[in-house]
Amino acid sequence: MKGEVLGDLALHMTADDTVVTAIDDLEAGTEIPYDGGTVGLVEDVPFGHKIALVAGEPGDTVVKYGESIGRLTEPVEAGEWVHTHNCESTRGRGDIVEADAEVV
C-alpha cells in the first residue's frame, strides 16, 4: 500500500499532503499522530473523508496524493473535516483553467 497509516486512524498518502483520509469513523477529540506531534479532531469525521493536517485559508490549495485536488472555500483548522462545505474541487474544471489563463 502506498502511503503511511497514522496511528491506525488515517492514511497519509504522501509527505506533501495537507490532508489525510479517515480509515474509520472518528470522533471529535481523537488525536492523530503527525510530524512528531498530534492533530486533534475538532469534529466527528466519517470513514473515508479528509481531515486537515494544517490550518488553511480560503483559496489555499488542498493537496492529496501529492497533487492539488481542490482549494479551500472557508478557513479550516488543523483537525477539521475537509469536504464540500469548505473545499471545492479544481479537477476537470475548465472554467478555472480559463480564468487562471486570463490572469497573466
Image (spheres, helix red, strand yellow):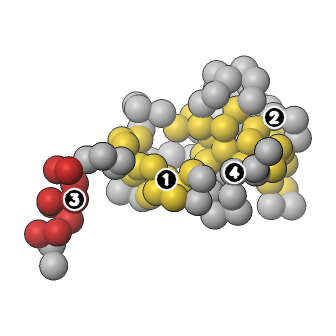
Write down the residue under mark 3.
97
Specify the quadrant of the image occupied by residue 96.
Answer: bottom left
Label 3: how many residues lie within 10 Å, few (<14), some (14-19) or many (20+)? few
What distance separates the C-alpha of mark 1 from that of mark 2? 20 Å
Return the disc, 1 or 2, that comes first in the chain's sequence.
Answer: 2
Q: Nearer the viewer, mark 2 or mark 4?
A: 4
* Sequence-wise first label, 1 or 3: 1
Q: Amino acid at mark 3?
A: Val
Q: Residue at x 59, y 37 (%)?
A: 50
At which x and y percent is residue 21? 66, 38
Q: Amino acid at mark 4?
A: Met
Q: Are marks 1 and 2 in contact (CB under 8 Å)?
A: no
Type of amino acid at the residue the image marks with label 2: Leu
The reply to whether dot 1 and dot 4 touch (C-beta < 8 Å) is no
Q: Closer to the N terminus: mark 1 or mark 4?
A: 4
Residue 97 vs 47, above or below: the answer is: below
> Does label 3 or label 4 sit earlier along the sequence?
4
For the N terminus, which image quadrant? top right
Determine crowd level at label 1: few under 14, some 14-19, many 20+ residues with C-alpha closer than 10 A. many
Observer-side mark, 3 or 2, equals 3
Extreme residue in the left direction: 102
Q: Which mark is residue 5?
A: none
Q: Residue at x 15, y 59 (%)?
A: 98
Check residue 62 in the rendering and tell me which mark sits there, or answer none.
1
Q: Disc 1 and disc 3: Cα gap in Å?
A: 17 Å
Cα separation, mark 3 vs mark 2, equals 35 Å
Q: Nearer the viewer, mark 1 or mark 4?
A: 4
Q: Mark 4 sits on what residue?
A: 13
Q: Nearer the viewer, mark 1 or mark 3?
A: 3
* Residue located 84% across and 56% down the image: 37
Q: Is residue 67 above or below residue 29?
A: below
